Image (cartoon, rainbow, N blue to C red):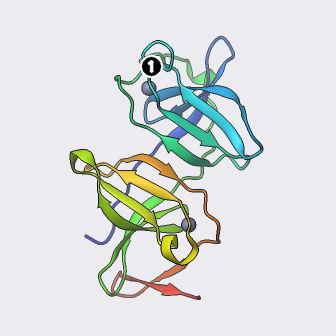
């Protein structure tokens, strides 16, 4: 398979009480303080009631750049807001797999490429930034066997690597 989409849907919602929540894959997250200069930390709405450790960091460009999305509970059916309280999706988040002409499969998240580095529990896989060795970049992603991104960091210390699609549907790296 050349191309598979990985879904991560995220938006902001405003509850009838006026609270803004971050809504990711049917789970709600509350703003949890301004974390440093880099972004805002959101933690799962069930952090206190269920001791859930899921979180997401959103930067000033409204991009989720770091998250842990494995919840220890089903989605909060909290969300019965009327359409008037919905806020348009602001997140620029694109993920897919590409295959290079030499057969290597890469995970692309927001224009950065990640290489398979090993298995994680339950049949999933861990990917590390393709510049992990050359630039010691620590960005990574954990993907479940159903191709859902469970955990990732897109904090890179370098610009994205560019890939070009060839007529065969496979990709080649362009530039440096
Ligand atoms: Zn949770
Ligand atoms: Zn990187």
Nearer-the-camera pick, 38 or 169: 38
Residue 128: x and y in percent read 44, 63
Q: Is mark 1 within 8 Å of ligand 1?
A: no
Q: Is residue 145 left or right of residue 9?
A: left
Residue 129: image location, x then y, percent = 48, 66
The residue beneath circle 1 is 51
Q: Residue at x 54, y 17 (%)?
A: 81
Residue at x 39%, y 24% (from the top left corner):
75
- The quarter holding residue 104 reads bottom left
Residue at the right extreme?
37
Q: Does residue 153 appear to the left or right of 169 in the view shown?
A: right
Q: What is the crowding at mark 1: few (fewer than 14 residues within 10 Å), some, or many (at least 20)?
A: few
The quadrant of the picture occupied by the N terminus is bottom left
Percent across and percent down for residue 141 are 43, 55
Instruction: Provide the secondary structure element on which disc 1 rests.
Output: loop
State which quadrant residue 58 falls in: top right
Q: Position of residue 14 (x, y in %)?
A: 63, 23
Visible in this render: residue 89?
A: no
Which of these two is toward me, 30 or 10?
30
Taking the spot 30% from the left edge, 61% from the top edge, the residue there is 118
**Where is 19 relative to 173, above or below?**
above
Figure check: 133 above or below 80: below
Q: Is residue 167 above or below residue 151?
A: below
The image shows a total of numbered marks equal to: 1
Quadrant position of the C terminus in the picture: bottom right
Q: Residue furthest left?
A: 123
* Location of ligand 2 given as a quarter of the image: bottom right
Choose between 22 and 73: the one closer to the eye.
73
């Amino acid at each position: 398979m050349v191309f598979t989409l990985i879904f991560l849907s995220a938006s902001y919602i405003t509850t009838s009480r006026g609270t803004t929540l971050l809504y990711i894959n049917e789970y709600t997250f509350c703003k949890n303080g301004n974390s440093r200069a880099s972004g805002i930390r959101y933690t799962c709405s069930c952090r206190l009631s269920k001791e859930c450790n899921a979180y997401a960091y959103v930067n000033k460009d409204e991009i989720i750049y770091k998250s842990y999305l494995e919840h220890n509970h089903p989605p909060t059916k909290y969300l019965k807001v009327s359409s008037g309280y919905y806020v348009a999706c602001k997140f620029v988040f694109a993920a897919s797999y590409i295959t290079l002409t030499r057969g290597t499969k890469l995970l692309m998240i927001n224009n950065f490429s990640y290489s398979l580095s090993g298995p994680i529990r339950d049949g999933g896989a861990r990917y590390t930034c393709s510049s992990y060795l050359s630039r010691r970049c620590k960005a990574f992603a954990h993907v479940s066997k159903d191709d859902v991104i469970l955990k990732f960091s897109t904090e890179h210390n370098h610009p994205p690597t560019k890939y070009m699609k060839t007529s065969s549907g496979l990709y080649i790296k362009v530039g440096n």
